[in-house]
Image: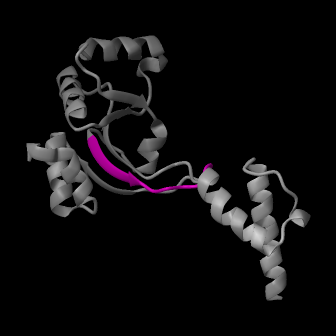
């Protein structure tokens, strides 16, 4: 019985690897040693392309005051953060682009993205919210939940990072972003 389960698992692994285009083989072409080598080498090299990373997300909406959004842009640049918007203004990319251009100066080089999935992933229901996320190495096509710290309120990103250092799971990552500004 155990032998049959092992063979079934090997076949599933081979099919999975072949479907992703990592290697082109059929189940009959591999013995156990070749399968082990394939799984140890090819899977690690080709399937785990989403490498470990740390992201500081600043969740916002264009309905926040322009002053708050400008401050968030400055802080995002200072702390290597990304401003995350849930959607576009009045279902118009033109209005959204104009609004962002109005609050951003040429000196601002902070990242601004529109990604409603991040709001769901981190259960953000009010803004501004700050999330420090450590994404794990994850197989392609699989959505792995990162470790993260979250705080919500009309606070500065510096205060958020200080709270993450004080009470969060990602103390070292928060210290790295805050640097000497502590």
Quarter of the image where one finds residue 134: bottom left
Quarter containing the N terminus: bottom right
The magenta segment is 129-141
- Relative to 5, is 82 on the left or the right? left
Write the residue at 44% across / 11% down.
94
- Residues 150 and 39: in front is 39
Write the residue at 26% across / 17% down.
104
Residue 43: where, in percent of width, then height?
Answer: 65, 58
Write the residue at 29% across / 52% down.
150
As drawn, the residue found furthest toward the right would be 28
As drawn, the residue found furthest toward the bottom would be 1
- Residues 119 and 176: in front is 176
Residue 13: where, in percent of width, then height?
Answer: 75, 64
Residue 112: where, in percent of width, then height?
Answer: 36, 28
- Residues 115 and 81: in front is 81
Q: Is residue 104 visible?
A: yes
């Amino acid at each position: 019985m155990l032998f049959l389960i092992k063979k079934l698992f090997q076949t599933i692994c081979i099919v999975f690897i072949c479907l992703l285009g990592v290697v082109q083989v059929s189940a009959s072409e591999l013995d156990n040693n070749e399968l082990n080598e394939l799984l140890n080498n090819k899977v690690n090299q080709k399937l785990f392309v989403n490498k470990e990373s740390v992201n500081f997300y600043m969740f916002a909406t264009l309905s926040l005051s322009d002053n708050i959004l400008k401050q968030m842009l400055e802080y995002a640049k200072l702390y290597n953060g990304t401003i995350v918007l849930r959607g576009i203004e009045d279902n118009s990319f033109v209005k959204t682009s104009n609004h962002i251009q109005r609050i951003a100066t040429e000196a601002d080089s902070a990242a601004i993205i529109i990604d409603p999935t991040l709001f769901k992933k981190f259960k953000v229901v009010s803004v501004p919210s700050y999330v420090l996320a450590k994404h794990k190495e994850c197989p392609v096509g699989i959505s792995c939940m990162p470790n993260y710290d979250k705080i919500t309120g009309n606070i500065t990103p510096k205060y958020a990072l200080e709270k993450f250092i004080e009470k969060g799971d990602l103390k070292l990552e928060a210290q790295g972003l805050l640097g000497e500004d502590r």
